[in-house]
Amino acid sequence: MRLDANLHFDRLLEVPALAREAEALGFDGIWTHETRHDPFLPLALAAEHTRQITLGTGVAIAFARSPTVIAYTAWDLAAAAPGRVVLGLGTQVKAHIERRFGMPWDPPVPKLRETVEAIRAVWACWQLGNRLNYRGRFFKLTLMSPFFDPGPIPDPRIPIVLAGVNPPLARLAGEVGDGFFVHPFHTPRYLREVLLPAIEAGARKAGRSRKDLTIVGSVFVITGRNDAETREMREFVRAQVAFYGSTPSYRRVWSLHGWETIGEELSALAARGRWEEMPRQVSDEILEAFAIIAPPEAVWERLQAVYEGLLDRVILYRPFQLQDRDLWERILSARR
């Protein structure tokens, strides 16, 4: 199982130092996400300032871009960091696609399937000289003149990892993706009983198996250098669980544990903008179902005990920042 860092920054110029530090400390990969910043730009800087570490988007919003735009960006990153780039793609929810990105909302599973197929068709055009002729329900790509063709790159293998919370996208990842990105709003039980069976079903449909895929998971971890910092992290995670748990389409996670009413209450509070009240709905029992809780030196052991066999790569859901170097050293020391 690989251990990866969640790249966090306020300004792009902070990224080179963060990337170098993550690699020097011994993290296996760094991942960016599409919240307050573009997920691709920091990886371009990280590619220049690292040599071995995996660089992944965890995740980029597929429906905010055309497949060709995604293909160009990932191709350039892969040329800069051969064999190290992972393209993580997610759908987001309807409100964000329509109201934050101003893009049309379509049925997510068939559209994401076409997105993956179209991206690979563009890459095959550039690498192998194939004629671009992708025709689907949502995308039609038939033009790639030499002026716009960047040509082949030394290592064209760019794994596409699809993200999701519910079984339909997990099945799609098993069928057409190179892996699945597990949303931080999950429990180990939900991963074991709901998501992995769906991934395996999709893989069987494509004549593949679980071992052909990489399962990446963003995991809530509550730890700290002292009691006060641990308490602060505990409340941060509680707020994050409440925020994600207010999403109506994520209700299935609550239902598995018999906590349907919690999801309903959180959605109602979010709809009224009562964000500060939401964390109070997440009890300690619920928090402990979603998070790994351990002192720094025991985090890795606890992650292994809970996620070995479930995840191939673990991303710590805690911002990776330079001022926390001593904490990261304590966490990573258990792996040496």
Image (cartoon, rainbow, N blue to C red):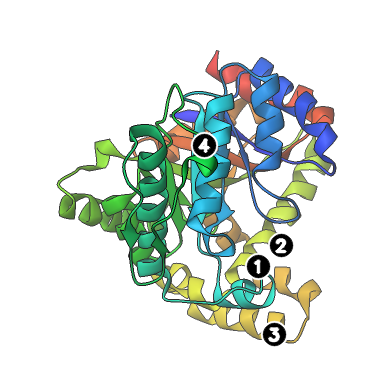
Q: Which mark is residue 51?
A: none
Total count of labels:
4
Query: Mark 3 is on which residue type?
Result: Ala
Viewer-side label of 1, 4: 4
For label 3, the residue is 271
Query: Mark 4 is on which residue type?
Result: Trp
SS of the residue under disc 1: helix
Give how far apart the Cα atoms at labels 1 and 4 are.
Answer: 37 Å
Query: Mark 2 is on which residue type?
Result: Ala
Residue 257 percent across, percent down from the top left: 43, 68
| Of pointers 2 and 4, the one earlier in the residue sequence | 4
**Horizontally, is 26 left or right of 215 in the view?**
right
| Quarter of the image where the N terminus is located | top left
For label 4, the residue is 75
For label 1, the residue is 242
Viewer-side label of 3, 2: 3
For label 2, the residue is 239
Q: Residue at x 55, y 38 (%)?
A: 56
| Of pointers 3 and 1, the one earlier in the residue sequence | 1
Q: Residues within 10 Å of mark 4 (few under 14, many from 20)?
A: many
